Amino acid sequence: MPARDTTRPRHIWIQPRSADLIELAVAQGATALIPPDGDGSLDTPDDIALVARDGDFQEGRDFMRHQIRSEHDEHLISADKLAVIEPAEWTIIPAENLISRGIEVILVVDDAEQARLALTIMEQGVAGIWLRDATEHTIKAVGEVLAELNPEPMALISAEITHIQPVGIGDRCCLDLIGQLEPGEGLLVGSFNHARFLLHSENVENDFCASRPFRVNAGAVHGYVITPGDRIRYLAELTSGDPVLVVNADGQARTLAVGRNKIERRPMVRIDAKTNDGQLISAIVQHAETIRLVSPDGKPSSITTLNRGDQVLASVTQPSGRHFGRPVSETIQER
């Protein structure tokens, strides 16, 4: 299934509870600011629009506000202006109907989960959100949602396989996601927080078992996996609903939630590789034909056919410590 189109610009209108939250709102992704009282003026940066009576976006000229209580209300909305939709008993279906008519919808929201839902309605999402009466906590939470929905591409490099060693029985995590992965897509998994292999999904057809395009057999319970916002999580701690970062061979990324984490005991194998500048990548994964890394040409390579000297894709960052998955500056060695 193709990834959601994130190229079109979004309206992220934030109405901070107080003027001292302006800098935070801009840092978290605001494209326009609204004065706390809904009118008046704000001292906004030059590249940030103002939604106000004399601002860049003006009610009546650029947008109209609506509250939809019936199907009749929907048909009163025209496509010649942005349609700002106030909360009502029904929100999702009316928004879908308006999107299908080609109307640019901005939903008024109060928290991060409402923002997430608005920006993913009918996959493409609405044209934007109006976050009203926003506190520091709410602004930061919406910023996390925006980072999750529009992750930055990941830099992938080629690494040379240096060592393959069976290590006996261990507990491995099989992540079933709530969406299907395309050929070349997988998760970034490794034993070290700064270096991960691109581990391919089980969407490869074979003669012995059905493909599972939603599944990544992700490796031993101790392994790290990249999640949105440059955060890493232990594979063992992931549960249903947790987001992970799906990456393809070109480094393009998208977010999918875990549907299920199956932890089962299986024979395991350690795989090591080294980059051109000598950085070590290592992971312990299940020893089976359906476990695949990704070669530089984007093709899956089964770990049972890999040899020393083969090239695979990996993501390597500057070594750093981690505190609950977030990078911190400290001296650290992993081996």
Image (tube, grey):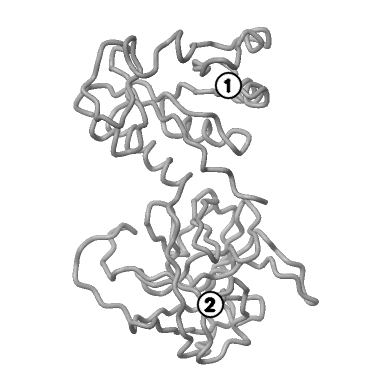
Viewer-nearest residue: 2 or 306: 2
* Residue sticking out furthest to the right: 207
Q: Residue at x 54, y 70 (%)?
A: 199
Q: Which type of secondary structure does the marked residue at label 2 adopt?
A: strand
Question: Whole-Å distance between the Cαs marked 2 and 1?
Answer: 44 Å
Q: Are marks 2 and 1 in contact (CB under 8 Å)?
A: no
Residue drawn 49% across the image and 51% down it:
243
Compared across the picture, whether 25 is left or right of 232 comes to left
Residue at point 31%, 57% (across, down): 326
Q: Amino acid at mark 2?
A: Val
Disc number lying in front (2 or 1):
1
Within-10-Å neighbours for mark 1: few <14, some 14–19, many 20+: some
Q: Position of residue 297 (x, y in %)?
A: 58, 74
Residue 131 coordinates in the image, percent (x, y): 39, 25
The residue singled out by tag 2 in the image is 285
Q: Residue 11 bears which disc, if any?
A: none
SS for dot 1: loop
Residue 274 image position (x, y, % from top left): 40, 84
Q: Which residue is mark 1?
A: 91
- State which quarter of the image contains the C terminus: bottom left
- Which of pointers 2 and 1 lies earlier in the amino acid sequence? 1
Q: Above or below — where is 267 with respect to 11? A: below
Three-letter residue code for mark 1: Thr
